[in-house]
Amino acid sequence: MEPIFEFSGASITLTEMLLAALLMLVAVILTAVIMRRGQSTEARELQRHLAEMRAEQSRLQGRLSQFAEDSERRDANFAEVLDTRLAGVSDRVGRSLELAQTRTGENLSKLNERLGLIDQAQSNIKALAGEVSGLQSILSNKQARGAFGEKQMQDLIRAFLPARAFTFQHTLSNNTRVDALIHMPDGHGDVAVDSKFPLESWRRMVEAEGSFEAKSAKSDFRADVLRHIKDIARKYLIEGETYELALLFLPSDAIFSEVHSHFDDVIDKGFSQRVVIVSPTTFMATLHTMQAVMNDAEIQKNAALIKREVSVMAEDVARLGERVERLQKHFRQADQDISDIQISTRKITTRARKIGKVEFETESVEDDLPVLKLVSEGDS
């Protein structure tokens, strides 16, 4: 049978415990019997067995005492190890909690910063949404959208051309009003610019893309553009008054690209009607070319004046050359005079040195008065 208690190599089984109890009971019975029968041989044998049982009981008690001591020592060691491990676990848990608290604080700080950025971005988004809403309201209104495109066209014209070279909302001889009229030089005629592109048809076509109405919307857009091109050619192309070409301003490079990519027939029809569709980018290039033509015309216009001024300037240059030549003669004469003055100065200086070296001699005369005689250095 398996032992009930086992410690440091000593073990006690249930059988041993029952046997010990039985031996104690038998010992008590035998003791009673021996006390009744006296000192017979069985009694002595029983006493011997009883002594052995007592010795076995003493050993059993010793083993139980040792087991109790070992159990107490093991409990103490276990409690000490448990306290040490619990202290280590508590220390690690404390450090982990402190580190987690620090990281949580840092994450909260970063979260607050990001929330601030999000609030700022949200404010910017709200402002942008307001601007987009305003732009959408402008584009949704036909008159406002027309004014938006016209304003963009006017800003480009003002940026490239002088004020005298254009007129806005000009009334032509046929009582039609054009959005802008650019005055070309030398009687070439004025270029009419229209900014009323049919964006409503374009929006309907874009919104119907992918649906069963796409084909009809595309056809309606083509018809509206061709009708508007025909109206421009009829109203703004006046022989002897306007230039042979008119411009249809489209205030979007993206739409301009789409029209050129998918509506070649509209572009060709516009050329045949002498109406050119321009975007902001191509309109800037056109205005730059017009500016160059105007500058060249101004130069040609003032060519006679420039030629006359250049002739007068050539005469002034020739006169200046003559005056320089005369001044040069004066300089040469002055140089000769200075040279002559230097020669005279050297002669005067030489004579002055000679006078400084004159010696005086004395001679006796009858009246014994001294007589001065100039002796030059060459006299002996």
Image (spheres, grey):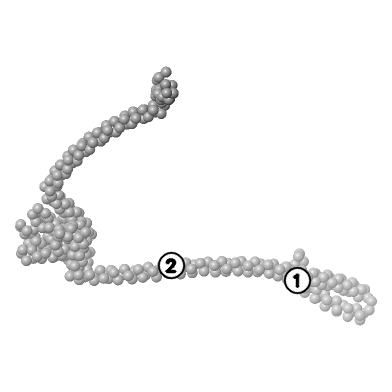
At 13% across and 61% down in the image, what residue appears? 181
**Which residue lies at the image location 40% right of the left edge and 20% below the top edge?**
378
Is residue 221 in sight in this rendering?
A: no
Left or right of 98? Residue 19 is: right
How far apart are labels 1 and 2 at the CA level? Answer: 61 Å
Front-most of residues 32 and 242: 242
Which class describes the residues within 10 Å of circle 1: few (<14), some (14-19), or many (20+)? few
Residue at far right of view: 39
Of residue 39 and residue 6, the one placed in the foreground of this image is 6
- Image location (x, y in percent) of residue 173: 5, 63
User: Mark 2: which amino acid?
Assistant: Arg
What mark, if any, has residue 18 been given in the picture? Answer: none
Disc 1 designates what residue? 72
Picture quarter containing residue 192?
bottom left
Quadrant in the rendering for residue 160: bottom left
Pick out the residue farthest to the top.
380
Horizontal side, residue 336 vs residue 292: left or right: right
Q: Earlier along the polypeptide chain: callout 1 or callout 2? A: 1
Identify residue type, mark 1. Glu
> Residue 216: x, y in percent?
16, 65
Disc 2 secondary structure class: helix
| Quadrant in which the C terminus is drawn | top left
Q: Residue at x 49, y 67 (%)?
A: 107
Percent across and percent down for residue 41 are 93, 73
Is 145 left, or right, of 82 in this rendering?
left
Up-down relation of residue 368 to residue 35 (above or below): above
* Residue 114 badge: 2
The residue closer to the viewer here, 280 or 52, is 280
Image position of 119 with respect to 377: above or below: below
